[in-house]
Image (cartoon, grey):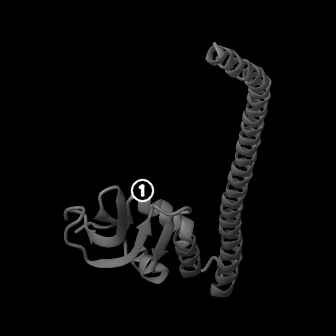
Amino acid sequence: MAVKIRLARRGRKRQAIYDVVVADGRAPRDGRFIEKIGSYNPNTDPASININNDRALQWLLNGAQPTDTVKAMLSYRGVLLKKHLQIGVLKGAISQEEADKKFEAWLEQKEATISGKVDKITKAKEEAKKKALEAEAAKNLARQEEFKKKEEEAKAAAAAEDAANEEEAPAEGEESSEAPESGEEENKD
């Protein structure tokens, strides 16, 4: 029986989450499995990989073959490095303490890289949010200026219209004063 470490899909449409399972190579992708050793969520940034490293290492040492994707994840988590170091210890090439020191040094470096990437992503999101806020403020200021210009133009037009009405009003007033005079003359006759 060929034992594989592979992904089993779950989750809803377009929001897939995968279980990292140990299964018989002949079993269907989402079918029977021997043991679930972790999960993988590619929807987050960076992708969330939660694997029980000890169980994965035990299965690898027992001969389970990871698929390409799972192999990349195990390498990312350091399980394959730990396997490599453990084989060196079993062969007597290095001691267990040296292997543990090498693995701890690699783990610290990897965690620093991951935290740096997370910090970079959050900083980029904050910068984008700040730029969007500044752009929105500039757009609102431009709208306010445009509104003030239109308001001033409307006031100027209203003032010009009032001035034109004032010029016409006395002229009409003179005509209206002449009209009663002529009307009075007509009544006198």
* Mark 1: amino acid: Asp
The x and y percentages for residue 158 are 73, 33
The x and y percentages for residue 133 are 70, 55
The x and y percentages for residue 108 are 70, 76
Question: Which one is in front, 88 or 123?
Answer: 123
Give the quarter of the image for residue 116.
Answer: bottom right
Question: Which one is in front, 1 or 40?
Answer: 40
Residue 24 seen by the camera: yes
Question: Which one is in front, 115 or 171?
Answer: 171
The x and y percentages for residue 85 are 59, 75
Q: Residue at x 71, y 76 (%)?
A: 105
Q: Give the quarter of the figure containing the N terminus.
A: bottom left
Query: Helix, strand, or loop for circle 1?
Result: helix
Figure check: 135 above or below 183: below
Reading the image, the residue beneath label 1 is 68
Q: Residue at x 44, y 66 (%)?
A: 41
Q: Give the quarter of the figure containing the C terminus.
A: top right
Figure check: 157 above or below 81: above
Residue farthest along the bottom direction in this orientation: 97
